[in-house]
Amino acid sequence: MTPFLRARRQTYTPLLSPFNEGRIDLLEFEAAIDRQVIAGVDGIVVCDVVGEGPVLGSDEYQSLLKTAVSRGRPHLSVIAATGTNCTVKTVERCRRAEELGADALLVTVPYYSKPTLKGVINHFREITAAVDIPVVVDDDPRRTAKDYGPALVDALAEIDPIAGICHGAGRLEHFAALPASLRDRFMHLSRDDRKLMEFLDLGGHGALSALANIIPSPVQTMVAMAERSSGCDPLLQAMSVAAAAVGGDDVAALKEAQFFLHQSPADVRLPLVAAEPETILRVRHAFAPFARCEPSTREAA
């Protein structure tokens, strides 16, 4: 599929990576992909931070990406998260993801090393010169420890293969300050489920929604109906409670919610640890209204 067509707002799901007794569970991963197909989301992201990409081995990463491509096509665009804070390593990962069939790449701004803006731009120039598929820049200063502000978006506009920018939590004011030319230049996606409707109201193009792992149909509905959201207020309120319960993108909490609604294992890998009992109770209470909304892929099978 061709990702990032802007005829309508779009939903992309950064898939959780299911573990069972420490190993990747590909059957559960296929079931998760099937839920996304049934819900009608536009695409999936494989092995980003929500998918615990940093703790996956190379073989595991490739296995998940191959499965996503074979199971998701032709219904879903498959976006491979390939970013690191090393340009050479990132280029290698991008090339391999393209070889394995990814439709696009999600590449984080280099984290923790805090390069200058010039260094970041050169990083992305090297990446885009090495591949022939679109690149989405993942800009989340909470994780990168560096906020370049609107200057980053302005500089990225000169790199043609960059198709989109994914905005992390707390970036509403940053996005609102962008001139119309930069809003039109890229596909702008929000990672912040708690502020998603506000982002869309400001002109955002869609979501990279961790919440869509659990309730893809409601998330897809809300994104598609953003301009008519007043008719969906009860759903919006329930989604806001659910997003708050999982802290936006707390992987352990998200996996507990996925276990509650879809019986998928809630295992995480160190340095992440299982959710605390009070978190589990909060998650179950928040997601209870959706228990009858989400189809069971096991029943369908």
Image (cartoon, rainbow, N blue to C red):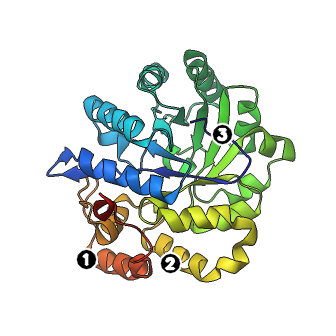
Q: Identify the residue under disc 2.
A: 241
Q: Position of residue 223 (x, y in %)?
A: 64, 62
Lower sequence index among marks 2 and 1? 2
Q: Nearer the viewer, mark 2 or mark 1?
A: 2
Q: In this orientation, which residue lies closer to the viewer: 106 or 83?
A: 106
Question: In this rendering, is residue 1 above or below 43?
Answer: above
Q: CA distance from mark 1 to mark 3?
A: 38 Å
Q: Identify the residue under disc 3.
A: 164
Residue at left 41%, top 50%?
Answer: 15
Residue 180 badge: none
Q: In this orientation, which residue lies closer to the viewer: 226 or 39?
A: 39
Occupied quadrant, residue 100: top left
Q: CA distance from mark 3 to mark 2?
A: 28 Å
Task: Indicate the amino acid at tag 3.
Answer: Gly
Q: In this orientation, which residue lies closer to the viewer: 221 or 47?
A: 221
Does residue 128 appear in the picture of this structure? yes
Occupied quadrant, residue 299: bottom left
Q: Quadrant of the C terminus?
A: bottom left
Q: Position of residue 76 (x, y in %)?
A: 50, 44
Q: CA distance from mark 2 to mark 1?
A: 18 Å
